[in-house]
Image (cartoon, rainbow, N blue to C red):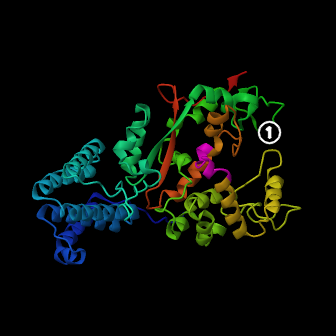
Amino acid sequence: MKWKEPTFGATPMLKALTAANAHRKAKAFDLVAEQKKQKLNYPDWAQTWMRKYKEDWYIAKANGDEVGMRKAQKLAEGLRSKLREMATFPKWAQEQMQKETVRWMAAEANGNIREKLAAEKAGRAIREKLGLIDTSTKEPPKKDDSKPAQVPPDKSENDSFEAELSKFPESYRPALLKLHKQHPSWRFIAEETNVDFNSFLKAEMKNGLVCTEVSKYGYSPSWRDPKFKYDRGYNAASPKAVSYFLDPRNFLTESRVFQFLSGKYDKNTQNKEAVNKVLSKSLANKGDVFLKAGGNEASAVFLAAKAMVESGGGTSTLGKGQVPEYIGWYNMYGIGANDGSALKNGAKTAKSENWNSVDSAIIGGGKWINENYIQKGQDTLYSLKWNVNSFRNSGTISKQYATNIMDAYTKADRFSKGLKTVDAPLTFRIPVYKNMPATACPEPTQASSK
């Protein structure tokens, strides 16, 4: 019998020693030098919180918790920003803002989201009294010709979490509150579709446009619409299954929410560091190429995540340009890889678009997705699968990226593996329909009868 080295989790004593050591380091931290470096004056109450954040950082570092380290750094920087803002206030406003800032930090430490939102609301009221406008929504200064300054696009995305949350139906809010607690920098945008949920469901069910290989999501016995060409092993999906996957409320979790990640250009994530966190395998050194593919119109992070999923990180047959009869033609996003003969169709598309290298496939395919989908309102995995814009504009379903009912669902999970570590304010566009059921549509537990 071989001896196996025992492993142990952190004991209560070890945790206590780690906390005590972190407390000692935080207490000894030179805040005088810190204030000189930051060119700021920390009042006593701010010094207390700065030392707390330092202590949290030391504990996270001792535990190898990079997320915790980044959170502590972000909270400390947020406090510095608040102090800089308060330095411009009159005394009465400083006192009131100090009270709300401490209230917010205490609520954040305790995980009390509602109290945090109340403190944010009170802070905005103070600014309004002062006649100030928060920098995130400030109108650009007028030019000398006195023409009205243009309002930046997507102004609503600069609203606070509380303001944006109020635009969602009540049935969405508990899950969004939980996500906000997990990732305070993420932004959730309510996309009003102006489409009736049941009408859209009926349109999706016409002619077997949605298929599945999972028996409980289909019919018993399995049914294939003769007018529709399915890949082997796939059958028509049932209305119960389609309603479940169509209902956004079923996917407001830390991984599944990536169905709604926006593919639109976002300056906060359009950088090589963010893109490289998503990439691995054969695409690990292609950050600059994806930035070029996105340009100033599409999210390079979104394109990178999509290529990772569609090409297996560049290791799929299409991604390696190894499809028989089409050797040397690359397709990183699965464009044109339709049901029936997916590999051949995808390679044929690559040849017609002249994607004769990995880089040309990344750039050309990214521009193709941007022009044909993102700029036409299909800028999320969800909207690529369920084209509500087409139905709203014409009453019919067209240009859906895939027929598999689980397409957005499974890709979102794989998106999340790389994207959850991106330390940036990711934007999620979540659709809201008219006449939705009071609660989320349930997942089928067995096949439906036909």
Q: Position of residue 139 (x, y in %)?
A: 36, 56
> Relative to residue 189, is residue 62 drawn left or right?
left
Q: Is residue 418 above or below residue 188?
A: below
Query: Which one is in front, 76 or 388?
Result: 388
Q: Amino acid at mark 1?
A: Tyr
Residue in the picture at 26% in, 52% down: 109
Asked if residue 235 can be seen in this view, the reply is: yes
Asked if residue 280 can be seen in this view, the reply is: no
Residue in the picture at 14% in, 54% down: 93
Residue 65 quadrant: bottom left
Stretch of the chain drawn in magenta: 372-383
Q: Position of residue 430 (x, y in %)?
A: 50, 42
Query: Which one is in front, 405 or 359?
Result: 359
Residue 90 quadrant: bottom left
Please name the residue that numbered disc 1 is placed on.
230
Residue in the picture at 24% in, 77% down: 37
Q: Position of residue 345 (x, y in %)?
A: 82, 53
Tell me if residue 188 is in the magenta stretch: no
Residue in the picture at 69% in, 43% down: 400
Quadrant where the C terminus sits is: top right
Query: Which one is in front, 398 or 119?
Result: 398
